[in-house]
Amino acid sequence: MSANSDIPGVEVRIEERNGLALVIARGEIDLATVDELALAVDPTRHQSSRGVIADLRSVSFMDSSGLAVIMRAAAALDGRFSVVLKPGSAVERLFSITGVLDGMLTFSDPDEAESVMREIERAP
Amino acid sequence: MALENDRGVLDLELPGVRASVPTARRAIERVALDAGAEPDDIALAVSEAVANAVLHAFEPGTRGTIRVTARRKAGILNVCVADDGRGMTPKAHSSGLGVGLGLITRLARDASIRSSAQGTVVSMRFEIPAAA
C-alpha cells in the first residue's frame, strides 16, 4: 500500500482586489504544506499592499503550523490582516478552541472582510 | 512500514520527515471512521503529535522513526505517537510546540507525554460514542 497516494496537499493563490491582497488557500495545511501559505502571507511581500485577506474557506484541514503562520502575519500587519472562515468548518473550530478567533479580524465572506478593512483604513 | 486497520487497529512506522504528518493523519482518520469515533479531533491531535516529533525529536542530519499505533478497547480508542529521538528539549524560539501539545490535551479525553533520552511517547485516549 502506498500511504502517500491520497495526500491532497494545498494550493494557494494571490489575487489583487482594489489594493488589497486576497490570499485564497485550498486543501490541507500542516507541517508538510504550510510553507506555501507562509510564502503567500509573508508580511514582507505585502508591505505596499493596503492589507491582506486570507480566505481559508476551502481549507479542509489545518493544524497549529498553519495557525502559527496566520498569527504571525496578523501580528506583523497589525490591523491590515483579516481571515475568512467557513462557519462550522474544522478550521473555524481550530481558531475557536485555541482562542485565536476572539483576537483576530475574522469574517465568513471576503466582501464583508474587504468592506470592514476599508472602514478601518479610513478611520482617523 | 506495517499498516493494519481492519479492526480499528493501526501500527504504522514512518520516517521523521514532514511528509509523514499527512500520512499519519490519513491512516488514523481511517481507523477512527472504522471504529465509529469522531475522526476530525483525532486526526488533528495525531497531526500535532507527529509534527512535534518531526520538528523537535531528532538531531539535525539524523534520520529518526515515528511509530503511530492505535488500539480499540471498551469504547475507547487508544492512540500512541512514539519517536526514537532525543526526548523533549525546550527551545526559546520553538515554532508552536506549546500550542500543539495544548491542542492535544483539549482534543483527547486524556493524554500523557513520556520523554527520555530514548525518545518521546504521546499517548492519547478518545471516546468512541455508543452506536445509536
Image (spheres, coloured by chain):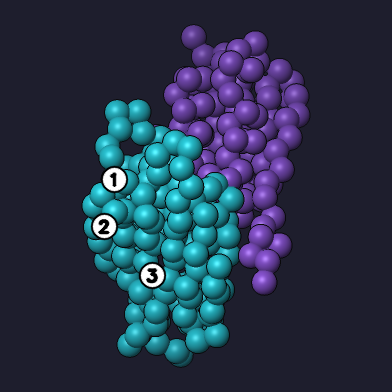
Secondary structure beneath disc 1?
loop
Q: Which residue is mark 1?
A: B88
Left or right of B9, for residue A37: right
Identity, as a three-letter code, of the amino acid under mark 1 = Met
Across the whole image, how many numbered discs are drawn on residues?
Answer: 3
Q: Does any portion of residue A107 appear in the rendered image? A: no
Secondary structure beneath disc 2?
strand
Against B78, residue B104 (above or below) is above
Direction bottom: furthest residue = B132
Q: Earlier in the sequence, mark 2 or mark 1?
A: 1
Identity, as a three-letter code, of the amino acid under mark 3 = Val
* 3 and 1 marks in contact (CB < 8 Å): no
Q: Which residue is mark 3?
A: B79
x 65%, y 29%: residue: A40
x 37%, y 55%: residue: B84
Residue A112 location in percent, x, y?
Answer: 62, 35
Which chain is displayed in purple in the rendered image? A
Q: Which residue is mark 2?
A: B113
